[in-house]
Image (cartoon, rainbow, N blue to C red):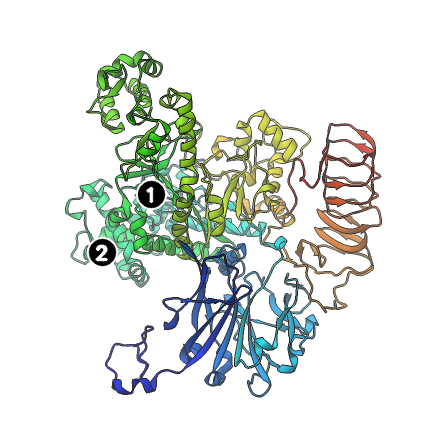
Amino acid sequence: AEPRGTCRRCRSKSSHICSLTFSIMPALTEPTVLFKFRVSCVASWGQLLQLKGSIPALQEGLDLKYQSSNFWTADVRVPVLAIKEGFTYQYSLKCDDRCPKDEVTPRRFQLPALGDLVKNLTSVDIQDDFRNPSDPSSLTDTGLFTSILFNRDEVALDLKSKAALSASGDSYIISLAVHNNRVPHGFQVCVGGGHPSLGGWDVKKSMPLQWDRNRQVWAGYLAVSKSDLPLEYKLLVCDEKFEKEFWEDVKENRKFTTEDVVGKSILARTDEFRYAPNHLWRGAGIVLPVFSLRSTKSLGIGEFLDLNLLVEWASKCGFCLIQLLPVNDSAEDASPYSAVSAFALHPVYLRLDAIPGISNETLKKIEVQRAKLNASERILYKEVLEAKMGLLKEIFFGNRESIYSDKGLKAFIAENRLWLYPYAAYRTMKELLQTPDYQHWGNRVNMSIEDMEKLTTADSMFRDSLYFWMFIQYHLHLQLLEAATFAKQRKVGIKGDLPIGVGKCSVDTWMHRDQFRMNKSAGAPPDQYSDYGQNWGFPTYDWDKMAKNGYSWWRARLSQMERYFCAFRIDHALGFFRIWEIPAECWTAILGQFYPCKPVTRAEFEKLGVKDISRILDPYITPQILANVAGTDADYIVSKFLTRKSDGTYAFRSDIPNEAALGTALWADPSRTDADKKELQRKAFALYHNVVIIRDQASENFQFRFDIGRTLSFQALPGDLQKSLKALYNQWLTQRQDDEWSKSAISKLQALRNASSMLVCGEDLGVVPRCTPPTLKELAIIGLRIMGFSVQPGRSVNVCADYEYLTICSPTCHDMSPLRLWYHEATPDVKMELCRKVLRLRSVPADATPEVCEGVFRQHVESPCILTMVPLQDVFAIVDGKLRAKDLLFEQINDPSCSKPGVVNWAYRMHITLEKLNEEADFTKKVADILLSGGRSTKSAVAVAPSKPSGYTAPARGRLPAGNGTLSEPVMFPGAQGTLSEPVIPSGNFGGTLSEPVDVQAASYSATLSEPVQFQGTLSEPVSFNGTLSEPVSYQGTLSEPVSFNGTLSEPVSYQGTLSEPVGFQGTLSEPVAMQGTLSEPVATGTLSEPVQFQGTLSEPVMVAAGGGGVMWGWKRP
């Protein structure tokens, strides 16, 4: 049998002995066709392009040969059967000792439309472009685009050839495929060109390609003769009536040459549709945990089916994504990041009365609990959990017989047995033995899946319990799947959350103990918010062992998430570069170390002049340090824990070998109150932590204690040695680790990315290694930027216009104050910078007014980031009235410092119902308008690419008519930037009203423009204007809103009128600019090479930044 499991002789797929004798097998070898691969791929020195595929010749990978001009080639013989049935292949760029760059999705070759012609094939020429996974365009191959926004499965068509296909005489066949996952419904990819079958550059006669569901490309066939060559063409997207179109952004026309076609049986080319850089896709989403949802049908907490109502509202607004926090079962812990299973869903999210077969009596009890628990503003987690679990047991035992015979449940159990049986057994034993620590479960500590299955037999005392938990998971699956399906129908994706850790006493560590470093704990080093750092209590991963089995646990975890989500957020993505690992004998995180981390040797310290390594390795406690740290408790600490050394310093006694022993001994003293013990612990730990280096956990070498400059031990060293050690510390923390951490992250994160089709986003906040941004960019993993977090030097808040495309921007996140509370807590300087310099408001309110919040919202919507994700609380803040919660502290989801008495962690719930939210028509329209004007709405029109094919003549239709009229949708003129709703080609003058964003090039207009506009051309009549001017322009009129200049004004520019808002100049003014009038506010100026005069009244500051340096403050419109 062949590797694919089919007998060469009789085609049977079962194991058997074929009657055909071995001696004549060579005579019946399956016929093959020669495939000649030619791939365009830009590579660096030392890189190698490899071809992988499902046919035997490609299963181990085949190296391609580099030819010239970035082309690579390979010849492969492919069985005819594989050509008929289709086979998959993909390219991989091998990068020295780094992980190879695999294309995001495999390609599929199949020629179903050629019929019997396949029998006569002698060769097939394949021409492809390598789809670099580092390119942002590769993101359109992920589930958000292919399954949600531009899903075409329901409109797939059978491939049929437009031309009469025959490969005889002077006729040659071209199979053309186009890879473009951004084509909206109602549009199609077409091929326009000079050949008659391509319409002779007439758009209406261009050849439409058809969607090939199996190959996930737009495909068609051409039959050309030698006399047709060279054949020039270009790709375009147009509607089905050929009334709206835009062309791809390539400088020169594409070509089929004589060399490409003549002498070839079939040429199969796959082109990548090229969008202009300024037409990168941008979307927006909202962030809200499931538990925070509130509807009239939910019971005390948000439920999966509540997502339907949130999706309905998000769809009306034009949001494309809803981001959740983790939804896994965390048992009695309200934190969604403390799951007992990485696979099981949380029972509290189940809508009980949606389960079939519930008795009327139970329904009445559900209504009683619903009324009681929904009366609370916040989530009463313990009460909700107890109520729901009690009702679920009543539902289960009331329908036990029908549940055991439920075919759907049986199929669900069979499909998910590898995680479902362990979860059900874990929950059963935890409840029975009253402890989640499986080390205390006796002979149940080590159980196989088969052992667990035996617990569900009819004679097992555990049958009901295991089936109860599996029954719950089955209905949770059905309800979350229903919500995900509803969202998909509304073109809204759901984004999940992948926590960095799992609980030490969880199902996953119970079943996969060898995959974890159980004697270590994950956390974070000390920072400005925590002197001790953070000890999360999660075991760290044994990445070496996980790599050996291909990260199977991670792949299974992501496959489970992909059932419901089209994107996911990696919690603490920095942990995949290096994790802060804390020994089990530590209570705090100070004495942890990064893992992996290259150590420092004894010889390196000796070279710097450290003669006695114990001086910087052991706690350094002089009488003066003891007095300064311990104060009046010095004598007590000496008597209990320290011993005096011969040099007069102190050391901890031998029975205090670690931090845990110190803490245990301290808290064991019955003579002290808890308050005294807490203060004593702070002082004693401060002495114990007073070291410069610690021992490396994996070798005889050393690691630096984090932030050595803060330790009294370091400060007591001679100045020269301090300087040398600080230099070594900086080198150790940066250059020494960069390459190691980058390689470590690439191997793990690439495995995660390749494990599913979901869009991958990484939370990369905190102490970010230098290698993190370029590594995430190389993997096309989207980072996160928060307005008030990790602020750039010299600023108090981040400016969204400065963010890169491969980032998500958010005003706040769940681990910090929501927008209104953040503003309330901000210093006057921060408020001043945000309001006056960023948002350009006239005043600086004491509290976050709707004007401030709307400005922040718009700043994020107008950013260049691929996604803007805004917490729902911050969206509510853009209006006044009932949508704003009265209590600012009420809206905070989690306070990691636990320092705000008014905040109850993980208890926030919407103060209005989702039903009421969907009735807020004015608010919904306001949000929708902001998203539409910012170019992020799912209701936005198609983006237009500017370039036209050479030889193209614009058809008469679509020209902008002379005279008056109204265009009520966004308008895009060829050659400019923006979005397309009604494509119009400018011709002549136009007078009328343009009520949405407009881009204009090379035309003369007389109009009133009521929305942001970008102009390239001449405005010959008075204009009321708000937008960006990027070329020399002559103006007469009134500028009633902020105006930004971007570019070089190489001729005199004159203004007549009133400038009533701040005006920002960006560029070089190389000729005199005449401006006369009164400046009533300060003017911030750059370098102006000629005199500048204003004519009119300037009632607000005027800011000038010369030399193209950017607008001094404020954000740029996209």
Q: In the image shown, does 185 or 535 lie closer to the viewer?
A: 535
Occupied quadrant, residue 975: bottom right
Secondary structure beneath dot 1 equals: loop
* Residue 755 shown left or right of residue 189 in the figure: left
Q: Position of residue 1095 (x, y in %)?
A: 84, 35
Name above or below for residue 905 compared with residue 780. Answer: above
Looking at the rendered image, the disc whose residue lies closer to the viewer, 2 or 1, is 2
Q: Amino acid at mark 1?
A: Ser
Q: Is residue 495 above or below residue 673?
A: below
Q: Does residue 927 appear left or right of residue 963 in this picture?
A: left
Question: What is the total number of numbered labels drawn onto the structure image?
Answer: 2
Give the Cα separation between the discs numbered 2 and 1.
Answer: 22 Å
Q: Dot 2, how many residues are within 10 Å of its Cα: few (below 14), some (14-19), or many (20+)? A: some
Determine the image quadrant of residue 448.
Answer: bottom left
Element on which disc 2 rests? helix
Q: Which residue is mark 1?
A: 330
Q: Earlier in the sequence, mark 2 or mark 1?
A: 1
Give percent across and percent down for residue 80. Answer: 42, 80
Residue placed under numbered mark 2 in the picture = 449
Three-letter amino acid code at disc 2?
A: Ile
Residue 776 placed where, x, y %? 47, 48
